[in-house]
Image: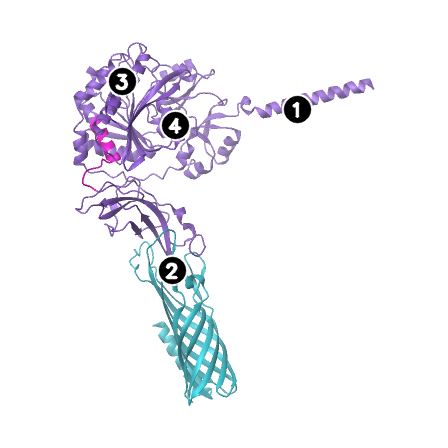
Amino acid sequence: MKRTGVILFLALACGLVLAAGFLLVAAAPDASGLVSLIRIAKGPALTAQVLARLPIDVRQELATCLLAFADREDLALLRRNRVPFTVLERNAARREFLVVQTSGPGDIASLRAAGHAAAVEPQTAVFWTEQGNAAESVPAGLPRKALPPRSVLPYLRTRPAPVEAAAAASAQDPFIESIVSLVSSSDLAAHVQSLQDFQTRYASTTNCESAGEALFSSCTALGLDDVHFEPFTFSGSYMSRNVVAEKTGETYPKEVYIICSHYDSTSPSRLTLAPGADDNASGTAAVLEAAGVLAPYSFDFTVRFISFSAEEWGLWGSRAYAAAARAAGDHILGVINLDMIAYADAMPEDLQIIVNQDSTWLADLFLAAGSHYGVVGGTKTVDPSFVYSDHAPFWDNGYPALLAIEDEPLTNPYYHRTTDTLDKLNLDFFTSATRTSIGLLAELAQPIKTGTPRTPVGVVASWVVYRSLFNALPAIHLAWTAQSDAAGYNVYRAPTAHGEFLKAPGSPVIGTEYTDTAVILGTTYYYVITAVGPTGLESNRSRETIPVESSIIASSSDRTISPLMLRGLR
Amino acid sequence: MRSRHLTAVLAAFVLALAVFARAQEVSLSVGAGGLFPSSGDYREIYGSGLSLGGDVWLKLRGRFGFAAGFGFLSDKGLALVTGQGHAEYPLSFRRTSVPLVVFYEFGSGPARVKLGAGAGFHSFKETWETVEWLDPLMRPSLSYRGHEISPRIVMTATLALIGRISVFGSASYDSIRAGADSALGTTVKIGGFQLLGGLAFKIF
């Protein structure tokens, strides 16, 4: 009896131990390395339809692939959909991964000496360490960027199909020309000199903090609508501050265009001497000059002048800013990031404009502005793999952004050296690049000119269907708020965002409504409205408006119509 | 053109019946009235329209007979709008019908009632009056033209007034499926109840 009791007790104990073990294993999926970092090759298998239905945690888009976190189910899903992928690291949970620009096998070897590295593209590697401190372990001098904390898949999914048409080339605007003519070479040089005079602006130093305060003071003196610091922590325990100045838009105050740069610097002697004249006092001086030149004018859209810090540590300042902007739901319409715009290795020097697929229109406009206001040439490069400056966090958060840089790959022999000083810069090229940037920014933000009617607001576009017994006429109904100084309104339509807007038949319209019947359901149209004054002067354009098909709902006969229900009209 | 031919053929057919079937009585009626459409969309767009009609009634031996005629319906309306639109697109609808029915007549003295059933031959056209320019390469015209045959039932009451002249009232129902779908994919119905009132003249 006693023996039986002991056996029962032992059996019960064994059962409890087994159950507890099972529960522990089940509750800790990461412990067995279930979350992997994978490389998904872009290609025919990775269509928009596949992307739309795969719930994969994509963290980085590169030119030829996507980097994603995936658990076992995700991997099985990819296999089922015949999407080719490569596992880079099986135990990816709670690890920090950096995308690092490499220029050859030597860089890969140095990365592997410092931790783990996997080449994912000819000039791109992913780097991580067992200890999880990748940012601190990555070899100095290699451009790097951390994977964003959230999936970028929503932005890839909503990306419109690529269009061949370039953004409409704007005409030179004499008013904007008069603004950019205020850009002064001597001012730019003085801004660079003052930043260089801090000896170093390495983000962890007090000199960098002082440089930030000087930028803050300079912006405050310009009489802008708002100037403030935005502090952030970086690389664990360091603190730094972005300097954010704003010229609030009068017509669309919540719609924002940004011109930005980073004001921190680095060099082999970064704690004591990192003058960073080209990288990136040049961009910062241009942003400061933009603030000074544009401050006296009023604009339809809000303009922010931002100087980021800790870019050289891995884009910390811009990462913090862009993530906060997305979390706050900020409507950032476009970002111009200036990073190294003053060194000329040859004359005439031109600018490299680097964009992702969503930002090509911005590059087209920049190049047009270059011919109008610079005058400086440029080359557009659509390269989502170039993520080593402050435009990249905006891409990560679904905002259009461009990087303007003197050369890519870089040719400045003083780059990240103690010899990167003002005397190495080409002021003519620097001034042209700055004028172009400010010209584009002014075009986007739309200066309000005296004597012209106010820019129309409250533009609403919706699909409408007019039905007879046998047929239907799809149309787009536009309505807007009346402006007291307008005698009429012009309606413009374009087939693509930022495309070539053509005046719609019947313009100018006397009232505040317009019905466009020359449309096909399933096609996207973009509209802008201008007000026309009694003397014929035309206002700036309203912001682009897209009608939404889903707005075709309950009809007067209590029926719901969706475009798909309408036969023969697509 | 086609409907005129059809009308001529039917008229010849009725005359031939009158001759060869040895009609006992031939009368002619003309009237005006309204259509009360069975389709909700029709009612919303056009409301109750004005219709005109005329028939030749051939009474054969006994109480049975044939009737053939001509009907015309004309309506104007506005396109229905779904969404926030405020534009107005005028529409017009015309229907020409040639009914042919067999009837049974009963009654006493000056009052007679005819109950009939048969078919209607309809030709119709809906027109978007201000939108005819649409790019034909992109989309067809929004106007629509069609022909359809449908069943018809009719009841007519006549009351003799003076000599050969009597007044009449008639109610008819045409179940006309237009043979085409609406933009929503539903079958278009252009029939309904039609009430006519007018005068009838007894030829012999």
Q: Closer to the observer: label 3 or label 2?
A: 3
In the rendered structure, which disc, 4 or 2, sits on the residue that comes first in sequence? 4
CA distance separating discs 3 and 2: 68 Å
Q: Tags 1 and 3 in contact by the CB under 8 Å rule?
A: no
In the image shown, does A306 or A498 lie closer to the viewer?
A306
CA distance separating discs 4 and 2: 50 Å
Farthest-out residue, front: A484
- Crowdedness near tag 3: few (<14), some (14–19) or many (≥20) residues, C-alpha within 10 Å: some
Residue sitting at x 19%, y 33% = A176
Asked whether the residues under marks 4 and 1 belong to the same chain, the reply is: yes
In the rendered structure, which disc, 2 or 1, sits on the residue that comes first in sequence? 1
Chain with colour purple in the figure = A
Q: Main secondary structure of the magenta part?
A: helix
Q: Which residue is mark 1?
A: A19
CA distance separating discs 2 and 1: 70 Å
Residue A368 falls left or right of residue A122: left
Q: Which residue is mark 3?
A: A214
In the rendered structure, which disc, 4 or 1, sits on the residue that comes first in sequence? 1
Q: Tags 4 and 2 in contact by the CB under 8 Å rule?
A: no
Per the rendering, the mark at residue A468 is 2
